[in-house]
Image (cartoon, coloured by chain):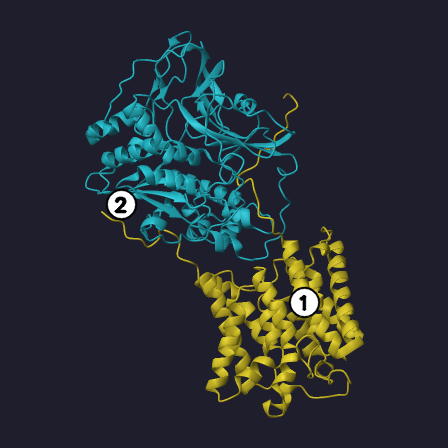
Amino acid sequence: MDDLRLLVSPSPHIRDTDTTEKIMFAVLLALLPVVAASIYFFRWDAVRVVLLASGSAVATEAIFQRLRKRPVTVADGSALITGVLLGLSVPPTLPSWMVILGSAFAIAIGKQVFGGLGHNPFNPALVGRAFLTASFAKAMTAWTAPIDAVSAATPLAMGPAVSRIPDLFFGSVAGSLGETSALAILLGGIYLFYRGVIDYRIPVGILGSVTVFALLAGQDPVFHLLSGSLLFGAVYMATDMVTSPVTKAGRWIFGIGIGVIIMVIRVWGGFPEGVTYAILFMNAVTPLLNRWTRPRIYGQGVKVSE
Amino acid sequence: MRRVRAFFGGIHPSENKQSTSSTPIQSLPAPATLVVPLLQHVGREAKPLVAKGDEVLKGQLLAEADGKISAPVHSPVSGKVTAIEPRTSASGRSVTSIVIENDGQDNWVEREAHPDPVQLDAKTIVERIQAAGIVGMGGAGFPTAVKLTPPQGVSIDYLIINGCECEPYLTADHRLMVEYAEEIVLGAKLLAKACGARKIIIGVEDNKPDAIASLKEQAGAVDVVALPTRYPQGGEKQLIQALTGREVPSKGLPFQAGCVVQNVGTAYAVTKALRDGEPLISRVVTVTGSVIAEPQNFFVPIGTPFQDLIEAAGGFSQTPGKVVAGGPMMGGAQFDLEAPVTKVTSGVLAFGVDESKTPNPMPCIKCARCVDVCPANLMPLKLEAYGMNEQWDNAEEYGALDCIECGCCTYICPSKRPLLHYIRFAKAEIIESQRRSS
């Protein structure tokens, strides 16, 4: 026993098997149905945009970390997720250089300048999307119809009168690559819920508040839920762990806040769509929500029996 | 049927109890040399009453309590005192210890047995528990007699006997409940009488149906309650919450919620002390883990070095990477095998080299799993950051001192961050600065 070499480390000595890499992989897996639907509806444009956005995101992360002389951590999958999410949230016809630029901006300005994974206050993919919308408004709203690729208006721009609900549900409408098929998004969302990656409170808060708001405003809630990037944002963007609250109460407020802001923009705002700005705004409020919704600590505020 | 409530948070680690949960407890013969530490728990070292060279009998008082938070220590064997010197204990600290050479005769001191100890009055019961050196055997080791004497005017509603054994791997309490239910129930009645509790509840996790059945056979008026299997169900505060719906006030003690909680091992030791006149000189220890050749539960004389215990369990089947005293969630890692079994050693675990490796931490992704599992309802990710950045005021404001150090946060973290480590750091700094300013 002279050669006994025992490791001394603080407790606990056992760990759960789930890891951050596995969580990132689960998110990528959950995006597969959405990627498949985008390829089905928008063909080679979808392949081109998603690949370019992913490649640009991963390359930007690696270059940035190399320049800062930090370990290159692209293997954790988080940059790839940002790239895929950004690719899925732009129109199919967006020029390649804009896709690359937007994705690079998302990683560089949305994530790395804050210190990388876990430190960014805003969802990086939405930062990239907001940047593209502000810089290239025309290209970012050049919508085409699925499959035959002729130019077309989105359901949100046309209004509920001319949109068929089944088309909105399956995705056979004009829109950003990943937003059109509610079915594919729900499949991914259900998987993420059962996998324990997303908290139901955020999407339910968003969808619930949009429904109530639409009913109060005298509009069709089903149309609002299925159109634009609402569902995509509610399932994949708002639920980003890094940029959403850590408390349960905070997540309800976060979700409801996003839903209300989306509807304010849709009903009274100048843009047809407000999901990006609604989530970014609530991202900014997240630290405050965490502070305001601290859980009551065990034994605090308990009366001492005499 | 008593309504069982949920405590906050909690986790479901793999239990890994199957290799020792159905084999009877074996009595381990005392080794040639025993090392009896004079401090085996919180509080002050006992004062030695013997000197080097003295002959001692089994059960003889070796050292007396020094002040209130201290417990006497008795000789686990008959033999000769060969040294009184500092030795490293399982906690890693150096503690004055009495080294005894076993003469193999097993000569007992005179024992004062009592056929029906329930007839004794409360004061006598407390005195004998104190004299027998009994401390909480679930882990913290607080002297039992102190817990049984709450301040004047405080009435105790519940005596809770903790049979949860929620730590993975450990089955010492489990086997004790299966094989010695009669002693545990009698011990519970004695403890209840001592503290004036009106009701007795024995709480057992529902992964031990044989223990529950065995206790119920003996229970009579004692309430045996099955609790959901969820770590840390056996945390004192969590158990009180689950069984009574009450909470122990922040920085307070269980009596402030009208409860006294004692471990099943303690209840057994109380019966041994009052019925049979035997002081606390042995306990059940689970020896297990992936690299232990023949995992087993033993009745072990206190003072037995871990080395002897591991050899009794067939030794190592492969090279060990880590040896832990206690459970895998709260136990302490050992740097050698020389530390002796004490009154609070519930298990000795050995893990292989690969499973002992500490994973590399990644950045926190704010998944909030630590918040979800914290039984104290804290925000461990915040406390970790405050601890890391040495922001003690913030750590205190976010309730660092309410942390029970169960380890759920570190266990669940997908980024493998040592959250509890930094929370402990913050707690120690806060307590130190409070001590300085007072």
* Amino acid type, residue under disc 1 in the picture: Leu
Q: Which residue is mark 2?
A: B258
Question: Of residues A201 and B317, which is closer to you in this image?
Answer: B317
Q: Chain coloured yellow: which letter?
A: A
Secondary element at image label 2? loop
Asked whether residue B260 appears in the rendered view, the answer is yes
Residue farthest to the bottom, as pictured: A161
Q: Which mark is residue B437?
A: none
Asked whether residue A106 appears in the rendered view, the answer is no
The chain that hosts pointer 2 is B
Colour displayed for chain B in the image of the structure: cyan
Report the Cα–Cα distance between label 2 and label 1.
53 Å
Q: Which residue is mark 1?
A: A31
Query: For residue B264, what is the image quadrant?
Result: top left
Q: Are marks 2 and 1 on the same chain?
A: no
Q: Are marks 2 and 1 in contact (CB under 8 Å)?
A: no
Say left or right for B122 vs A20: left
Secondary element at image label 1? helix
Question: Of residues B320 and A159, which is closer to you in this image?
Answer: B320
* Amino acid type, residue under disc 2 in the picture: Gly
The chain that hosts pointer 1 is A
The vertical placement of A41 against B163, above or below, is below
The vertical placement of A64 against B395, above or below, is below
User: Residue, x 78% and y 72% (percent of image)?
Assistant: A47
**Residue B142's x, y, as percent?**
36, 33
